[in-house]
Image (cartoon, rainbow, N blue to C red):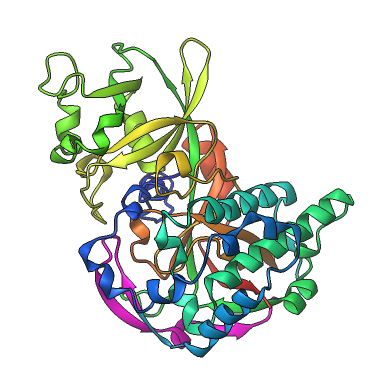
Amino acid sequence: MSNLFSQKICITVGIAALLTTTVAHSYFSTHSINQQLVQPENIQDNSALSQSQISLASMQTASVTTPIVSQISDKYAASVSVGYPVIDEWKNYKFSINGNQILSTAKLPTSKVNFNQTDLLTTLVNTRKYFQDHATQDLDILRKGLLGTQGVSVEDILKTLDFMIVVLEEDIANNRSTRLQDPNFINKNFRVIKWNAFNKQNTSQKQLRITKYAVFTHPGSRTKTSKFNTPIYSLKDNSATDKFYTRYTKQDVLSGIYEPGGKEFGKVQPLAYLTRDGLEEALLQGTILINFSDGSRTFFNVDRNNGISYVRGLKGTAQKRYWYFKKVDAIKGYGYKIDAKISVKPGVTFAGDILNIGLGKVVVIEHIKGGRKNLQMGVIADTGGAFLPNLYQLDFLAGIFKNRQEFGQHIRQLPEYATAYFLVKK
């Protein structure tokens, strides 16, 4: 998807953002020594969720109630606490927040909810399947997160995804506008929880900041040329045990250590060659679509980084974090490893704080458009370094664009700030 793409747009289009979406995924698979800091909120409650309870088979019904699930739900309800410990990407405790300070019961305004039905269904199904296939390997997605302070469990989120999938499938099969676009249907069937932004650097901010990211198409070459002289690399299989790549900054890589004559030549695989600007955009966006000089085109997505944190406020060319890529078949969102990442669709996907807000949260944003309230629905299916932690911002996947000018024209109709609501199946 996107990796710090919004920061680039801040520089070029004026959309202030410091995002890194998708690219934060690789470290989520590592549980640091600080994990015990979050166990009371996380593992001890969520370990009761068995693989069968996360089964995709529950998609075939509008609910997933079983005696065991009911017991888990009761357990969550009985353990509600308004205090929540916020953690960073390395699982270090940062600060505590009172959930009631930023979350409250609400109702959606009586305006049609906008989204592409087929694209939302695809993204919901892929997100739900990630829980089914990878929950045992990726325990981060079983964190209740901030919504746990409101009695919302992981099981509630799975029930929400299941119900929405069933409704969309039925409505699409009957060739009708989906009931999920009707605010009355939503208010009747879902808990609507308003999300007020919490920004320690700007305590007056109440609405969520809505930054935007995209996939850009770029020209490139499969071999090095005078114009396309900056490579993107893929790590080889043995890099899972040999962490040599963590010793080198982006500047080290660009100095030619992997090129013929370099001291690490042969340890990585060059995938494509771009211009230097193309490389920076690929690193910022996380996903890039390269149009090769031979007429072919291929998606590439970030895989693993060198373990160096992204520094907010530092320009892209000065960042020391570097990402290695892999070939993929679609725009990719969150995933604990490259082969597990969620395939997502533009217009219905948000990137957010997966550790503290959570994967699979369905969000509706409200803003004024043409003098009227406008509602837009999407699902948090991506993340990034700028969200670690971040309780005041979402990044909206806007689409695939030829250049920044085309992207800038498209996002002028989208809000910079919006009122946000979580939807949770009753």
Identify the residue shown where x is 72% and y is 64%.
Answer: 163
Q: Position of residue 416 (x, y in %)?
A: 50, 61
Q: In the rendered structure, which segment of residues is drawn in magenta?
A: 85-108
Residue 391 seen: yes
273 with respect to 185 (left or right)? left
232 with respect to 173 (left or right)? left
Identify the residue shown where x is 41% and y is 70%.
Answer: 391
Q: Establish if 87 lies above or below 323.
A: below
User: Which residue lies most toward the left here?
Assistant: 263
Q: Establish if 72 lies above or below 50.
A: below
* Quarter holding residue 251: top left
126 with respect to 44 (left or right)? right
Identify the residue shown where x is 34% and y is 57%.
Answer: 386
Identify the residue shown where x is 76% and y is 62%.
Answer: 61
- Decide whether residue 144 is among the magenta residues: no
Q: Position of residue 327 (x, y in %)?
A: 44, 28
Residue 206 seen: no
Q: Give the number of callouts.
A: 0
